[in-house]
Image: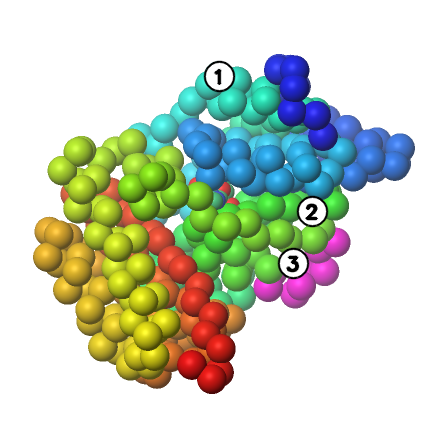
Amino acid sequence: MNNSPIQTPELIHSPKEIRAKVVAAQKSGLTVGFVPTMGALHEGHLSLAGRAAAECDVTVVSIFVNPTQFGPSEDFSKYPRTLDSDIELLSHYHPVWVFAPEAADMYPPGMSTVVSPPRVSSPLEGVSRPTHFAGVATVVLKLLNMVPADIAYFGQKDYQQACVIRQMVIDLDVATRIAVCPIVRDDDGLAMSSRNRYLTPAERTAALSISRSLRVATERLEAGDRDAESIAAGMRAEMHAAGIREIDYAILANPQTLETLQTATDTVVILIAARVGGTRLIDNCVVSLSPTE
Ligand code: AMP
């Protein structure tokens, strides 16, 4: 990887072409890292590209706003599309190939196969967005076939998505290794998201109660509190006090199965999904406690 000088990434639209380039690179002995995104890139996405560029010889970043992972009342049509500035942001890493397929190439007429996502897709997002993970699993499997990279990089920001993809590649014998990278936050603690640009200043202030709730819950766990239900109630109260009325979930869960815990164990994941104004935000944090605590 070379982070300077700036070099415009190569833009590829055709699935056949990107696959041929990836396979040829690998045949010549190069390793390929892959970062699937929906574009509107921010520092969170760039941290994945930076890690891929550090660990692999070539980085592929896909930009595709996947219609099948949006529900009928969700923000597919207004989801930000900023391909030119995305490409510019990626010019700090190279070599980068930007793969931006057309919807007609991803879903040609007659395409009807859908991946049934693994069990870990059922709770939480699976309840709030019942068709979401079938859409995610299908598009990610297609992308991994088009870009058969050595390593694919995903963010812990979408914790359940990472669980779904890790299990899917095991279950379906996908050769690409999956790496999960830490959440990148703004200075005020808000987890970076392409959807944050929808927030008004007042909504953004309210949204800060999400990461604050995670911090308060973590502190309670670190202080020895193991009452997961009471900690979860505390998170909901913190968000309510900030004006958030619609909380899809705020729970402590088993980090592998995502089953809700009544009593905290050695390692827990704390997961929140809440609607702030018209914007649905998710955040999480993993807390590892030594058994003696
Ligand atoms: P998206 O474009 O929202 O589909 O995200 C593409 C990838 O970037 C996913 O693997 C996300 O988990 C990851 N990602 C999104 N936001 C962040 C963040 N704040 N920190 C780290 N990774 C992120």
Q: Is residue 247 above or below residue 57?
A: below
Report, in whole angstroms, how far the alpha carbon at label 1 lies from the one at label 2. 26 Å
| Residue 41 appears left or right of 98 | left
Mark 3 vs mark 2: which is more N-terminal?
A: 2
Magenta stretch bounds = 167-175
Q: Amino acid at mark 1?
A: Asp
Residue nearer the viewer, 219 or 77: 219
Secondary structure at numbered mark 3 = helix
Ligand 1 closer than 8 Å to the CB at disc 1? no
Residue nearer the viewer, 197 or 172: 197
Q: Position of residue 74 (x, y in %)?
A: 30, 43
Residue 210 in view here? yes
The residue drawn where x is 43% and y is 22% is 82
Whether the magenta-drawn stretch holds residue 171 is answered as yes
Residue nearer the viewer, 134 or 181: 181
The residue drawn where x is 89% and y is 33% is 28
Residue beneath label 1, please?
Answer: 84
Secondary structure at numbered mark 2 = strand
Q: Is residue 108 above or below residue 119?
A: above
Q: Is residue 159 above or below residue 220?
A: above
Quadrant holding the C terminus: bottom left
Quadrant holding the N terminus: top right
Badge 2: residue crowd in 10 Å (few <14, some 14–19, many ≥20): many
Q: Amino acid at mark 3?
A: Val
Residue beneath label 2, please?
Answer: 151
Quarter of the image for residue 185 reads top left
Residue beneath label 3, please?
Answer: 169
Badge 3: residue crowd in 10 Å (few <14, some 14–19, many ≥20): some
Q: Position of residue 39 (x, y in %)?
A: 47, 31
The residue drawn where x is 19% and y is 64% is 236
